[in-house]
Image: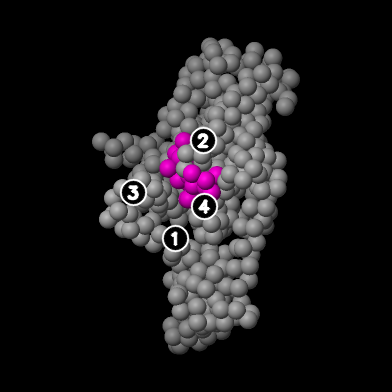
Amino acid sequence: MTENKNRAIAAAILPLVGGAANVTSVVHCMTRLRLGLADRSLVQDEALKALPDVMGVVEDETYQIVLGPGKVARVTPEFEALVAEADVPAPAAAPAHTTTADELADRGAELKAARKAKNATPVKLFLRRIANIFVPLIPALIGCGIIAGINGLLINLEWLPGVTPALAAIASGFMALIAVFVGYNTAKEFGGTPILGGAVAAIIVYAGVANITAFGQKLSPGQGGVLGALGAAVLAVYIEKWCRKWVPEAVDVLVTPTLTVLVSGLVTIFGLMYVAGEISTGIGTAANWLLDNTGAFAGLVLGGLFLPLVMLGLHQALIPIHTTLIEQQGYTVLLPILAMAGAGQVGCAIAVFKRLKHNASIRKTIKSALPAGFLGVGEPLIYGVSLPLGRPFITACVGGAAGGAFVGLFSMLGTKVGSTAIGPSGWALFPLLKGNHGLGTTCLIYGGGLLIGYAVGFLATYFFGFSKQMLSELNQDVDAGESPSARAETVSASPEPAKV
């Protein structure tokens, strides 16, 4: 039954994105189905948003449909199967729908301008490539992190002493070799042979490097971590491409992989490992200094700005920093602070629910999205509630800033709150919490930050999230089938648009 349901969801989405012939690529992250499309104008946005299982859509380098954690991983294979099974010619014209030609032209012009202004900058394109390297690693990071947390609890309680060594091995194995996976994904992302990228990155974690001296000091296995692996794999890609250009085809199969691994390997050992090690140490030192000396302010800024990063899809670019901190210290001190943004979003959504007592559409969306919000999945509330409404998105950021300042303050006072893995936030982060004090203290501080984020997000939205005109337009009996974004567009089109 579940498989049939997932296939039904995929079947409902496919025609609304222009059919199988319009789909050029299909991938997914933790919450989103990411589609490459031949013709963006064939997509029926409002019809997609109206589907019960679609929490929102995001226009980016790819077209992203927010389905939520767990569900997206099950729907994606069914969607890929439907695309593969279809045998239809490329669409010659847009499918019949209610959008007029003028509206379609206007939408296309707006999308083109938005893409050019926001998504085509070299920095953003580079950050997305970095994110593509690390996103596939998140499931393993989550699983191993939770196992590590369970193992630590068992050790502290002195339970199951015969099992804890096995759990430690299971939790640590992936992290010990994460550089290899980063190298493999990096080479794949930059257009090289993935296994060669993994082979070069494996040098970093090889125990034998302890016998090598570089820059006047002995190397240590793992020195440089994921940053070194990333740099080594990128170098390998460029060397491989150079070889493919100049090496004769008759000997390419022998010469190209040999030169790629040899040259990039020597540069990695006698240069990249040391340089990347210094950079990694600098990241850890900077993060600790920032929170030790400006904890409350740093937390306020980080917690307040994280929702805009999520909105732009750039939050994944922080994964290498989190991973570096976990490699060095056993936990990342940044993730619990950034998680406060989700708390502000939840508080904001509850306030919207209370204020718009007569809007069945928005209240229905909030009811369905709040459980995911409490578990740290913010996209449904962002794209389904706060962002379309405008001002509540700002007040949600205020709630996140307050929660971040609270957690950052305790870090400045000497009590650090960290996470042993990346991925979850909200209440789902509790099994991954770790700090420099006891687990009880760490959980209390993190929980206190969440409560403050909820409260400030609620109060800021309740009292400052709506103008009188917004309440007049939105707080009326609306059919539950109409999407919040559609209502928000109606408000924004009024003579007096809401101002923050």
Q: Residue furthest left?
A: 1
Which residue is labeled 1 in the image? 175
The amino acid on which the numbered mark 3 sits, given as a three-letter code, is Glu
**Residue 97 position within the rendered picture, expressed as x and y whole percent measured from the top left:** 50, 31
Cα separation, mark 3 vs mark 2, equals 23 Å
Which of discs 3 and 2 lies nearer the camera? The answer is: 3
Relative to the observer, which residue lies in front, 425 or 289? 289
Separation of residues labelled 4 and 1 (CA atoms)? 12 Å
Q: Is residue 421 magenta?
A: yes
Q: Amino acid at mark 1?
A: Met
Marks 3 & 2, CB-CB < 8 Å contact = no
Q: Is disc 1 placed on a helix, strand or loop?
A: helix
Gap between marks 4 and 3 measured at Cα: 22 Å
Residue 63 among magenta residues: no
**Residues in magenta, as a range:** 417-438
Res 368 → quadrant: top left
Residue under circle 2? 444
